[in-house]
Amino acid sequence: MENIDLRTARKVAVLAQGLAPSQLGSLNSLESVIQRLGCVQIDSIQAVRRSQEIVLLSRGVDKSEVDSLYTSAAGLFENWGHAHSLLPQSLWPIFHWRRDRIRKNGLSGVPYNPKVATDVLKRISIDGPATHGMLGKTRGNGWDRSSEVKVACEWLLSFGELAVVSRDERWQRVYSTPEQANMPTEEKLSVDESLQKSVDLALGALGVARLKDVYDYFRFPKDPQIAEYCHESRFIPVNVEGLKDTWLIDEQLLDKVDELDWSSPHISVLSPFDSLIWHRPRQLALFGKDYRLEIYKPANKREFGYFAMPLLNNENIIGRVAARVSNGTVKIENLEIDETMDARFVEHEVARTLQLWTDLPEEGVKL
């Protein structure tokens, strides 16, 4: 079995995710980036910008395209990827295995009322796309904050009976039938075929991974078939210097690593939900950072900050920044930079990036 050093493994991971400095040019379209990643996790929190927007901006997608993210023109749909995610419409057939699994096994959480679901589907089929608020009562009672209509919409979305390809001005999902949304429903794959293609997609997005990292990427079921598909893929098993377990690596990217220039510093600000680092055990193993989400902790329990964004310099994570937009400024709540880096350079790059993302004047970023 081949041995590779940790630095090379990091480069392959970064390259697979479209974050190598040489990949961050003007040619990175929204479509090409999401096709590469397979999915982008959705989160409603908007400390600086929403997480899914940061994932795209950090990979060089133009702001005008990012601003169109929630329109049907983006060519995306919402469903289960890693968590609730944006996915390219072309991948609709590839996730047949998940829709089939949900139909058979259900979802955790509030069960749906079949009669309400039938009524919702019938109304949308006849009257056209609608938000759940347009369909009926939108609030539950007591601790149940969801109506039967909203729950039915979410289940129908998970089954693939409904699709979401846009949101309205209040950021509410607009539900339609897959046919109304022009989803590629005519392409049929078996459950096994779609599962294998999803595994290949996850491997390609990871670049270098252990089996448990592959299982995590699209939250695959604990099925030995997944391991079989991994071993049948073009990825080769390797030992990574200083790390446990066998890693699978993309041989094509391994060959490409040395062709690129990794010498000049380049700082990318990442979402805490970025697919490069969303699996914390892999983040710790590959990048040596044990950054934890503190968004859902009370303020007095946070060790670093509310919305902590890792900082990537080429193939290394070299720190993190906690920032929030408030009253027309970006307030830096905390900033951590490895001693190996030029702190003033990193501060400048972070401030410049946040200013560009938020369209605030240069003086609007408060370090």
Image: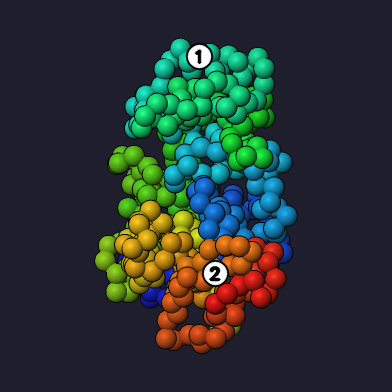
Residue 22, image quadrant: bottom right
Label 2 CA crowd tier, 10 Å (few <14, some 14–19, many 20+) = some
Residue at disc 1, secondary structure? helix
- Which of the two residues, 94 or 192, is positioned nearer the viewer here? 94
Residue 365, image quadrant: bottom right
Above or below, 358 against 226 in this view is: below
Q: x, y percentage for residue 73?
A: 71, 41
Quarter of the image where the C terminus is located: bottom right
Does residue 329 appear to the left or right of 194 in the view shown? Answer: right
Does residue 230 appear to the left or right of 96 in the view shown? Answer: left
Which numbered disc flags the more N-terminal residue, 2 or 1?
Answer: 1
Residue identified by numbered label 1: 118
For badge 2, the amino acid type reads Lys
For badge 1, the amino acid type reads Thr
Instruction: Indicate which disc residue 331 carries.
Output: 2
Residue appearing at x 46%, y 50% in the figure: 202
The residue sitting at the left extreme is 244
Residue 238 visible in the picture: no
Q: x, y percentage for residue 363?
A: 66, 75
- Which of the two residues, 199 or 127, is positioned nearer the viewer here? 127
